[in-house]
Image (cartoon, rainbow, N blue to C red):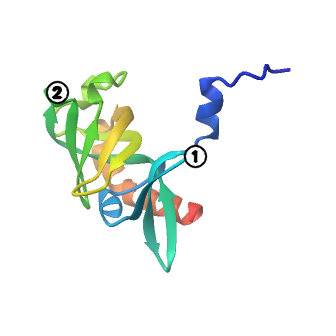
Amino acid sequence: EKSAGTTSTDVERTRPPPVKVLSGQLRAAGNWGTADSGASCVIRLGRGRSLPVSRVWMQGTVLEVQQDRDTVLLMDETGTFIVQGVNNIPKGKPCLSQGKYVMVMGIIQAISPEPVIRAVKMADLSELAALHRRMWKLEVDDLQQVLA
């Protein structure tokens, strides 16, 4: 029998999983607001369907690293987005060089003028970048269709 105290793992478990998104979808999103679960926005999926998003999973190429400002600028096929808090990410260092193709999981901080994500996790996908880049749009579409 488990004790009544909630642990951080319980909190993790009740949070919605991150949604795979493209930066252009965040830029075009509406309803920016702060819900109980933290800030969220609603991305539009076409055919009148939409999806609320606060935790995201994104991929892109590192354009610029500003370690003094704890940020990197990434670009996916729909535009650029900023990732904050990169210096504190465990195993994040390999991701912090220009030209790397990386995965970021994090929490939306802002969506305009361009999306800003606070990183929770990062991984370097450069080794198979061509494959990841090709598959990414399909993965995003696939997951969003399931969730919406």
From the top left corner, tell me how far across and down residue 111 is, in percent.
Answer: 31, 55
- Residue at 72%, 21% in the rendered image: 5
Q: Residues within 10 Å of mark 1 (few under 14, many from 20)?
A: few
- Residue at 22%, 29% in the rendered image: 70
Please say if 123 is above or below 59: above
Q: Residue flagged by tag 1: what amino acid is it?
A: Pro
Q: Which image quarter: residue 105?
A: top left
Residue 5 seen by the camera: yes
- Residue at 43%, 70% in the rendered image: 44
Q: How crowded is mark 2: few (under 14 residues within 10 Å), some or many (20 or more)?
A: few
* Tag 2 secondary structure: helix
- Relative side of 140 to 94, left or right: right
Question: 34 or 75, which lies in front?
Answer: 34
* Tag 1 secondary structure: loop
Q: Which image quarter: residue 1?
A: top right
Reading the image, the residue beneath label 1 is 16
Task: Check contact, mark 2 vs mark 1: CB within 8 A.
Answer: no
Reading the image, the residue beneath label 2 is 67
- Relative side of 52 to 123, left or right: right
Please say if 76 is above or below 65: below
Question: 70 or 89, which lies in front?
Answer: 70
Residue farthest to the bottom, as pictured: 47
Q: Residue flagged by tag 2: what amino acid is it?
A: Gln
From the top left corner, tell me how far across and down residue 55 is, in percent.
Answer: 46, 46
Q: Distance between the residues labelled 2 and 1?
A: 30 Å
